[in-house]
Image (cartoon, rainbow, N blue to C red):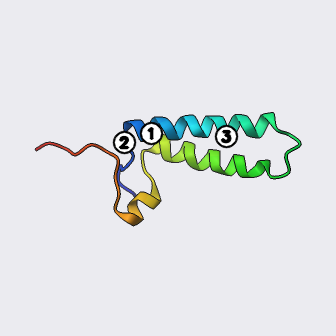
Amino acid sequence: MFGTNVGGIDRIIRIAAGAALLAAFFLMPTFGYRWVFLVLAAIALFTGLMRTCPLYSVFGFSSCPLKKR
């Protein structure tokens, strides 16, 4: 579907942010909009683990290092 366009550092940041947002979802049970944390966590974790970002594809951006020939 989409090619790989998320590089190493970007991937680590996305996975860490997803884990933090997921923790916030469970640690703030009385927060009214806590479901937003769950949605953002799912997006961050999915794009980090799958190494692809649909928005990067739309805008033609990639944080992957260039391949040498």
- Residue hosting label 2: 7
User: CB under 8 Å between callouts 2 and 1?
Assistant: yes
Which residue: 19% across, 44% down? 67
Q: Is residue 41 left or right of residue 51?
A: right
Q: Tag count in the figure?
A: 3
Which residue: 45% across, 39% down? 11
Point out the image quarter for the C terminus: top left
Q: Can you name the residue that lies furthest to the left here?
A: 69
Q: Can you name the residue that lies furthest to the bottom here?
A: 58
Q: Is residue 4 left or right of residue 65?
A: right
User: CB under 8 Å between callouts 3 and 2?
Assistant: no
Between disc 3 and disc 2, whose residue precedes? 2
Dot 1 crowding, Cα within 10 Å, few <14, some 14–19, many 20+:
many
Which residue: 53% across, 37% down? 15
Which kind of residue does numbered mark 3 sit on? Answer: Leu
Q: Using the numbered discs, state the Cα–Cα distance from disc 1 to disc 3 in whole angstroms.
A: 15 Å
Dot 2 crowding, Cα within 10 Å, few <14, some 14–19, many 20+:
some
Which residue: 35% across, 47% down? 63
Give x and y (percent) for residue 5.
36, 50
Indicate the secondary structure of the residue bearing disc 2.
Answer: loop
Dot 3 crowding, Cα within 10 Å, few <14, some 14–19, many 20+:
many
Give x and y (percent) for residue 57.
39, 61
Indicate the secondary structure of the residue bearing disc 3.
Answer: helix
Between 1 and 66, the one lying in front of the other is: 66
Give x and y (percent) for residue 46.
54, 46
- Residue hosting label 3: 21
Which kind of residue does numbered mark 2 sit on? Answer: Gly
Give x and y (percent) for residue 6.
39, 46
> Tag on residue 11?
1
